[in-house]
Image: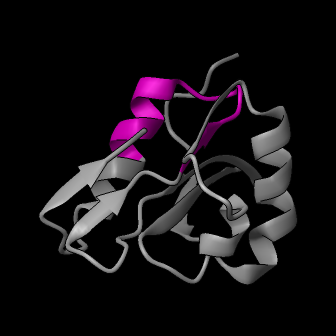
């Protein structure tokens, strides 16, 4: 079963660390930025959003800016329960509220 929409999209919190680690380890689609930091180390840097369905984390997107005006997609992880394109649109839409002139991924 593939869900079209999660029930909740919200900013990531420190208490989400274990769920994010699990999603990164077991997610069906995972992009991690080539970085020396773990994805959970970016939780306090916005934008970093998670999506939940029935109290289970099903997706995460982190694309915080570094010291310049450019943001990097540091993490995009998706559980097999959700449609990748739909969840990308939902999470990306939330990140657009943060002022950054350009976003990049490696």
Q: Position of residue 65 (x, y in %)?
A: 35, 71
Q: How many marks?
A: 0
Q: Is residue 32 left or right of residue 85?
A: right
Q: Where is 62 relative to 14, above or below? A: above
Q: Residue furthest front?
A: 36
Instruction: Residue at 71% x, 67% y: name it.
Output: 40
Q: Position of residue 103 (x, y in %)?
A: 26, 53
- Hey, which quadrant is residue 27 in on the image? top right
- Which residues are drawn in magenta? 75-90
Residue 89, visible in the rendered structure: yes
Color scheme of the displayed model? one colour
Quadrant in the picture for the C terminus: top left
Q: Is residue 73 left or right of residue 1?
A: left
Q: Residue furthest top?
A: 1
Q: Position of residue 57 (x, y in %)?
A: 73, 52
Instruction: Residue at 50% x, 79% y: name it.
Output: 45
| Viewer-proximal residue among 103 and 58 | 103
- Indicate yes or no whether the magenta region holds residue 97: no
Residue 55, visible in the rendered structure: no
Quadrant in the picture for the N terminus: top right
- Hey, which quadrant is residue 46 in on the image? bottom left
| Viewer-proximal residue among 94 and 102 | 102
Q: Where is 36 relative to 10, above or below? A: above
Q: Position of residue 92 (x, y in %)?
A: 34, 49
Instruction: Residue at 58% x, 59% y: name it.
Output: 50
């Amino acid at each position: 079963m593939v869900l079209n929409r999660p029930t909740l999209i919200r900013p990531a919190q420190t208490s989400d660390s274990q769920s994010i680690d699990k999603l990164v380890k077991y997610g069906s689609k995972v992009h991690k930025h080539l970085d020396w930091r773990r994805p959970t180390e970016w939780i306090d840097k916005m934008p970093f959003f998670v999506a939940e369905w029935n109290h289970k984390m099903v997706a995460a997107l982190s694309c915080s800016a570094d010291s310049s005006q450019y943001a990097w997609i540091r993490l995009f992880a998706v559980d097999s329960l959700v449609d990748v394109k739909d969840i990308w649109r939902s999470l990306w839409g939330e990140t657009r509220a943060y002022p950054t002139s350009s976003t990049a991924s490696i």
